[in-house]
Image (spheres, grey):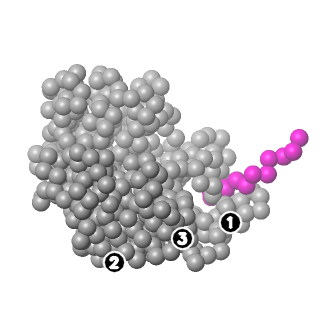
Amino acid sequence: MTPNTQPVTVVAGRYALEEQLGRSPTGIVFRAHDTVLGRTVIVRLVHPDLADDPAFEAALTDASRRIAALSIPGCARLLDSGLEDGVTFLVREHAAGTGIRQRIKASGPAPVDEARRGMHEAMGALAALHELGIQHLALDADDVIVSDDGAARLTDLGVGTAIAEARPADAADLLGAERLAPEQLRGERPDARADVFAAGAILFEWLTGERPDGRGSPRAIRSDVPRELDRAVARALEPDPSNRYADARAFAHALGPAAEEPDAVTIPEPRRRGGVFGWLGVPLLIVGAVAAAIVVAVLLREFDVVGQDVPPGSTVGAEPPEVPPEVVRAASVSVIDPFGDGDELSSNAILASDGNAETAWRSENYFDGVLNKPGVGLVLDLGRTREVLGLRLSTPHPGFRFHVAVGVDPDALIDAVGSPVTAAALTHVRLDGTGRYVLVWITSVVPTGDGDRAEIGEAEVVVAGA
């Protein structure tokens, strides 16, 4: 039998990375095997740019030390942490089950009682954290794991807290605008009420299969949602934090009968392993011919090229390309409006690629909030045919939806657009094509304070180096 020679990456001499589960501007997450204790764990490799920020490193160290000292039912524990060839890693308990968003994709919105019960349980765990002065601050539907028996557990604590402490102005870019409370999007220092907002958004999605996107009433989409539950979700999603529930305990109480008190929270002595946080310096062990330096180089390159919208599945350990990618602005920008009047404020199109995110291309005002046509698009002309790897799009008003295509014939791009993307304050989309033109095809608008529009502050294209 031929032996399996597939390279395996082992972190800290014990955590063998098995499958990439996700990627975001804050890091890459893997399912891994703890070779010492023979168990499945979750390993997060923190984005090197964050780890190189002394303020963020100090905030993450403090948050992780506090979280690692806790044992709270319903929260995945932080088991280990360290520094490996300049890459910070966190090791968490593996929570068996599937995330809420994955469950929705598989079987649609949950029965009302199931969603209410699951969120009630998750809020009990979050309440125990709030009562200890700890917030999640990056809670998303993927961070609530539901087991086969319906038990809900929270995971991925710490990173959101560190960003709130050290990089609050960057929270939308690093965590994704769709998961954050309005005060976080404004760069303000959040508190427990930001977690309440995130929990309300998760319950809205669990009940309807849709993210709130500024809406507060799941009953408006699904008529069997009880009115008292609808009111609880709407209050949790109040834009003004002073109008929300004060913390997770209050929200849990509003969801139904008082939650059962969680088991006693134990606070053991912190583990002492070469310092308060126990940063490790063990070199990365690679089974096979791939060197540790190559792995770190690949991680750095992957983080630079892609962001929150990249699907999981990339192979760690591949040889990096010889020429690094580059970010370019369009030589010219034009508007296409084949289903409207053909104009769509084309005179200010260049503002979407002028190097200044403070100036923005704005669509016309759609007074009823609906395009009433298949879409309107911006065509970015790169000046010559390029190998296109991705798009970076910023907007002062997130929430509108768009699709992207690349090609050599601008008239054919509408028929080649990819899956819809919801615009965040800064959105990264991976592309894989060759062409001179990139189309941003907009299919919805959002309230901007000056009408219902789509606005693009800056659209930059990531291309293979010349």
Residue at the spot x=84%, y=46% of the render? 3
Q: Which of marks 1 and 2 is nearer the N terminus?
A: 1
Q: Which residue corresponds to the image point at 13% horizontal and 50% vertical from the top-left?
A: 367
Q: What stretch is highlighted in magenta?
A: 1-13
Say what secondary structure mark 3 lies in: strand
Considering the whole magenta stretch, tell me its main secondary structure.
loop
Crowd band around label 1 with a 10 angstrom C-alpha radius: few (<14), some (14–19), many (20+): few
Task: Tell me which amino acid carries mark 3.
Answer: Arg
- Mark number for residue 319? 1
> Which residue is under mark 3?
386
In the rendered structure, does residue 2 fall within the stretch colored magenta?
yes
Relative to 453, say whether 459 is above or below: below
Percent x, y of residue 37: 64, 43
N-terminal-most mark, 3 or 2: 2
Q: Residue 324, image x and y in percent?
A: 57, 74
**Mark 1 or mark 2, which is nearer to you?**
2
- Please state which of residues 65 and 9 is positioned toward the viewer in this rendering: 9
Residue under label 2, please give it.
Answer: 355
Question: Is any atom of residue 241 visible in this view?
Answer: no
Helix or strand or loop: what does disc 1 sit on? loop
Few, some or many residues within 10 Å of mark 3 (<14, 14–19, 20+) = many
Residue at the right extreme, as displayed: 1
